[in-house]
Amino acid sequence: MKRFFASKGRAAQFLIFALLILLALPLIAEDTLTAESLLQKHLDSIGSASVRNAAKTRVVQGAATYKVLVGGSGQTVGNAVIASDGSKLHLLLKIAALQFRGERFISSGDKVYIAGTYDDKRRSEFGQFMVGEDRLIREGLLGGTLTTGWALQNLEEKKGKLTYRGSKRVDGEDLIAASYSPKKSAGMDITLYFDPKTFHHVRSIYQISQGAGLLSATEGGEVAAARQTEIRYRIEERFDDFKTADGLTLPARYDLRFTEELQNGFTKTIEWDLTDLAVQNNLPIDAKNFVLP
């Protein structure tokens, strides 16, 4: 009888040990990740190399909702079109609001055009920011895997650098983080996030700050200058609702947010929520779509 209970005790101990090993497996797998293995797993999550390389052009269309989340209120609906051919891109976010028509970004691959979409041809706050930070488009970052110019699919060509940062908790989710450094960095913090199970790219966060300028004595002198804060900008992209078509698994939802914090304390956050995205690969796209005005 004692031998029977002893064997049951050893079996229970073995079961507990096995469960602990199974629970630890995700952590062990994560610890073995490197930037290179993360990159490969991510690319494989999109599709096989042959299928990825065969997709020369891509057209993504869907519904778009524009919202002012901070610094105002209101929302309006419209549509979105993302057309890409290699590193060329035409991103159109169109609404029929009073005075403001949305956003239009065009890249010929080397140069970028940001349209003025107010009635008086002014650019939005987001558009004006992108004029100075158009490398997000030239690098193939904005839009993520929805474009054929996606930075991580063209990492060697872009000469960018991916650095593995481990597991990070973001808005209650455990994600894998990696920083991206363009060939010519200019102070922007770029962090890409991946689902630890599927390795889909699910989020990008871009942050940059500009220091306060010095005021002259007539403008308040050193005391007023000390009261000034930095101007902060933040872009956040979220990708969700992944679906497979033509052998490629891509997001059917794309959420884009832009936040501007000014020195006077005013903050504005806008959101573009793109849903029900339909992806078509290898459609013929007129080259005029990528010609800069």
Image (cartoon, rainbow, N blue to C red):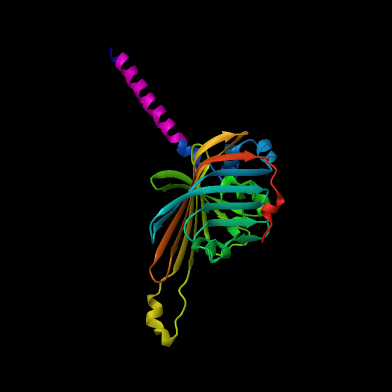
Q: Residue at x 47, y 56 (%)?
A: 97
Q: x, y percentage for residue 96?
A: 50, 54
Which quarter of the figure has residue 108? bottom right
Q: Which residue appears farthest toward the top when viewing the image?
A: 1
Range of residues picked out in magenta:
4-25
Which quarter of the figure has residue 270? bottom left
Q: x, y percentage for residue 266?
A: 39, 67
Q: x, y percentage for residue 174?
A: 43, 43
Which quarter of the figure has residue 4? top left
Q: Residue at x 44, y 81 (%)?
A: 215
Q: Which residue appears farthest toward the left when viewing the image?
A: 1
Q: Residue at x 51, y 62 (%)?
A: 124
Say whether residue 254 is magenta: no
Say whether residue 11 is magenta: yes
State left or right for residue 26 relative to residue 279. left
In the image shown, does 280 or 55 lie closer to the viewer? 280
Q: Confirm whether residue 155 shows in the render.
A: yes
